Amino acid sequence: MPGFEIINYKEKKAINDIFDKNGGVLFAHGYEKLRKKFHVREFEKNISRKFKIKNSLVVSSGTAAIKIALKSLGIKSGDEVITQSFNFIATIEAIIDTGAKPIICGIDKNLNMDINDLQKKISKKTKAIIPVHMLGQSVEIDKIVSIAKKNKLFVVEDNCESVGGKFRDKHLGTFGHLGILSFDFGKTITTGEGGAILTNNSKLFKICKEYHDHGHKNSKNLTRGNDIRSRVGFNYRMTELQAAIGKVQLKKLNFILKNNKKRYFELFKNLSKKFFIRKDIKHSRGINDTFIFLVEKKNTREKIIKILKKYKIGTKNLPDAIKWHCSYYWNHAMEKKQIKNSKTSKEILNKYISIPIFINKPLKTYRNLSEEISNIN
C-alpha cells in the first residue's frame, strides 16, 4: 500500500503550519529569526529513532541517495559496482553517474539477488555491491554482507521498495555500510519525492551531508554565507514541505504495514494452494505491499490480468512495467555483456504476476479476487 492512499488532514495541517506558525520558511537551513522548527532535521531524527540507526540524512530522492552514498565511498571511473537484474533503473543510473561500471547479477526463483552468481561476478575492479529489497521483501542480506566483508567490498543497501521490512528483527536498510530509502509518491510512505541515507558510520555520514549540500560543512560558529567547504558537492537537499509531510507519514507506517498484511492474506489463502508464491525468506518480515506469484502458462496469465482489470487493480511492475525493472531492457545504459547476463532473469520475471495491495480496496475485494483467480482452469 502506498502512503499516498492515506494522505489526509494531518498532512494538510503540517503544510499549513509551516505558513501559519513557522514563518513560511521552506528551506532546511538558516532563517532562525523567522522560524520555530527545522522540519528536515526533525524528520532525520525521527527516522534514526524509528529504524534504530545512528545517522539519517534526508535528500531529494532515493536515486540521489544512492549516488550520494556511492560518492561517499569514493566510487569512481574504472570501478565496478554489482547490483541485480530485477531492480529499478535508478540504481544503474546512479552507478553510471559516478563514472563506475554496473555489473549485473542474476536472480533466484524468489526474485532475489542470486548469491552464487554474485560470487562469480566479483573481480579485482569490484568496489561495492548494491543488493535491492524488491517489492516488499528482503534479500539474503546476511550472506551478502558476509561475502562483501570477505572480499573487502562496500555494501549500499537499496531499501527503496521495502521500507518497514525486517531481517532477524532488524530493519532493512541498516545492514550495509549505507542504506537507502525512497519516499516518492508510489512508495510505502511518501513525501512526493524524497529519499534518505542511513548509516552508523559517522565518517561516511559527514561526507554524505557535505556532498548533498554543495560541500557545506554547516559550521556552527559561522553564518551560511561564510561557511567553509572541503569538497565539491551538489544540491540534493530536501525541502521543509517534504519533511513536514514525511514526519506525518512516518507515524502512519505501522498502520500501513498492519493493513497490508490483512489484504495480502486474503490472496494468500487460496492462491498459495495453486501457485508458487514469492515468500519472505527465512528470518525476514516483508511489508506485504505486493503479492507476487508464478504463473507458468501464458494464457492463464492473460486471464488473471483481465480479472485484475475488472477489479480495477492492475499489476505492479510485473508485467506492466517490466521494462523499467529488468536490466535486459536497458541497452541504452549498459554494455551488451550485461544485457546478455540479464536474459535468464527476464525469462524468469516474465512468468510472474504482481498484485499491488491497496488499503482503499476493501478486504472483500481481495477475497473475491483470490477466489476468482483460483477458479481459473
Image (spheres, grey):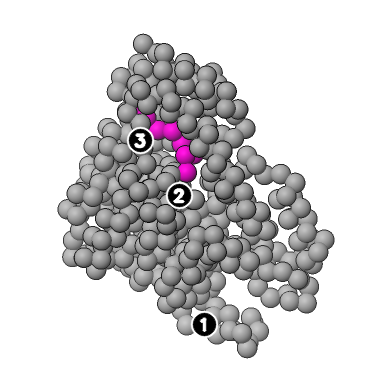
Which portion, as a residue range, is magenta?
A: 287-294
Numbered badge on residue 278: 3
Q: Residue furthest right?
A: 20
Residue 291 in picture, x, y percent from top left: 44, 33
Is 323 displayed left or right of 226 in the figure? left
How far separated are the C-alphas under marks 2 and 3? Answer: 15 Å
Residue 62 in picture, x, y percent from top left: 49, 55
> Which residue is depicted at the point 50% across and 75% down?
210
Q: Is residue 350 visible?
A: yes
Residue 139 in picture, x, y percent from top left: 34, 49
> Which residue is depicted at the point 52% across and 19% down?
368
> Which residue is depicted at the point 48% across and 66% down?
53
On screen, residue 300 above or below 11:
above
Contact (Cβ within 8 Å) of mark 2 with mark 1: no
Q: In what quadrant of the picture does the N terminus appear?
A: top right
Q: Earlier in the sequence, mark 3 or mark 1?
A: 1
Q: Residue at label 2? A: 165
Q: Residue at label 1? A: 229
| Secondary element at tag 1 | loop
Among the 4 quarters of the image, the one containing residue 299: top left
| Secondary element at tag 2 | loop
Kind of residue sitting beneath label 2: Gly
